[in-house]
Image (cartoon, rainbow, N blue to C red):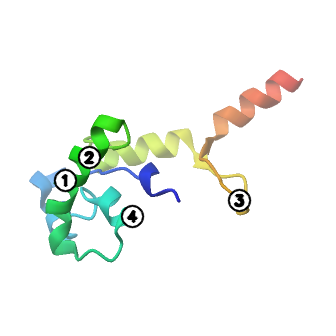
Amino acid sequence: RGALCTIDRPYSELFGFFDSIHHHIGSTHVCHHLFSNLPCYNAVEATKHLKAFLEPKGLYNYDGRSTLAAMWDTAKTCHYVDGVDGVQYPRSIFDTILANKKDD
């Protein structure tokens, strides 16, 4: 269900060394979630075609920042979901704080 919400994020530290030793799971993450049975050795090629198909439709997510910068940004915005039932969307703790202030 949320496969298109994932982000291709190459582990760019050390010139892509970590991405390589992790079988490119960061840079082929969207493909992995759409086709989880696809062997990792085909994922790079499949991602090229998937990106060409999804990007013009605005459905391809990519973040080229370093892993540490992306982790820090995610930690700062503190994403969470409200529950486990039904369709859930990530929220920020700041959204909750602002909503509570409006109610006051």
Mark 3 or mark 1: name the one nearer the start of the chain: 1
Mark 4 lies on a secondary structure that is helix
Q: CA distance from mark 4 to mark 2?
A: 16 Å
**Callouts 4 and 1 close, C-beta under 8 Å:** no
Q: Which residue position is annotated with label 3?
A: 86
Work out whether residue 16 or residue 82 is closer to the camera in this orientation and state it. 82
Residue at 71 percent across and 59 percent down: it is 86
Residue under label 2? 53
Q: Residue at x 65, y 33 (%)?
A: 94
**Figure quadrant of residue 16:** bottom left
Mark 3 or mark 4, earlier in chain: 4
> Closest to the observer: 11 or 33?
33
Dot 3 falls on a residue whose secondary structure is loop
Percent from the top left, x then y, of residue 24?
20, 64
Q: Earlier in the sequence, mark 4 or mark 2?
A: 4
Helix, strand or loop at label 2? It is helix
Residue 11 lies, in percent from the top left, at 23, 55
